[in-house]
Image (cartoon, helix red, strand yellow):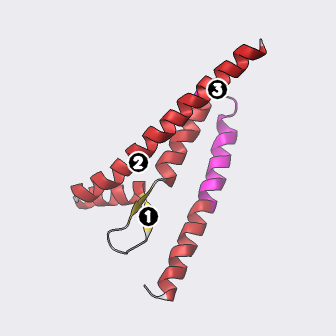
Amino acid sequence: MNADAQMAYGIFWTIYVVAFVVFFILITRAIRPLPIYGLRTLIQAVLVVVLLTPVASPEAVDWWIPAWLHGGYESILGEAGEATRAFTNMALAGAVVGIVWILDLVRVGIWRRKKD
């Protein structure tokens, strides 16, 4: 890949991550009134998995693209294999984040129990 393509790739990911951070902050503030801690953190975990899970690009070596974008696009085009690869990445990331979410709920439950 040439230098212009590499620069465009870097600019894309910079804009994407900045936009994600802004969106995540806005959603976090919007769900703050929810009374259930587990529900708030679950929404945040789903956002992270859906929007930040990457998949390797089949077109360019060493380039990564958002899995939801690649999977959705390939689903529309009818490329089931590529869509499955993207959504499998998201499922694996979801499983890992789900375990972390459950451990966080256990940690908060134990901390509150010891505090009483």
Residue linked to disc 1: 65
Q: Earlier in the sequence, mark 3 or mark 1?
A: 1
Check disc 3 and give the amino acid type. Answer: Arg
Residue linked to disc 3: 107
The residue that appears at 41% across and 54% down in the rendered structure is: 68
In screen coordinates, is 57 left or right of 75?
right
Graded by Cα atoms within 10 Å as few (under 14), some (14 to 19) or many (20 or more), the crowding at tag 2 reads: many
Check disc 2 and give the amino acid type. Answer: Met
> Vertical placement of 18 versus 11: above or below?
above
Measured as percent of width and height from the top left, residue 28 is found at 66, 41
Q: Earlier in the sequence, mark 2 or mark 3?
A: 2
Which of pointers 3 and 1 indicates the residue nearer the eye? 3
The residue that appears at 65% across and 20% down in the rendered structure is: 109
Is mark 1 in CB contact (under 8 Å) with mark 2?
no
- SS of the residue at dot 2? helix
- SS of the residue at dot 1? strand
Residue linked to disc 2: 90
- SS of the residue at dot 3? helix
On-image quarter of the C terminus: top right
Measured as percent of width and height from the top left, residue 19 is found at 61, 59
On-image quarter of the N terminus: bottom left
Check disc 1 and give the amino acid type. Answer: Ile
Marks 2/3: CA distance?
A: 25 Å
Graded by Cα atoms within 10 Å as few (under 14), some (14 to 19) or many (20 or more), the crowding at tag 1 reads: some
The residue that appears at 72% across and 18% down in the rendered structure is: 112
Q: Which residues are magenta?
A: 18-39
> Vertical placement of 26 versus 35: above or below?
below
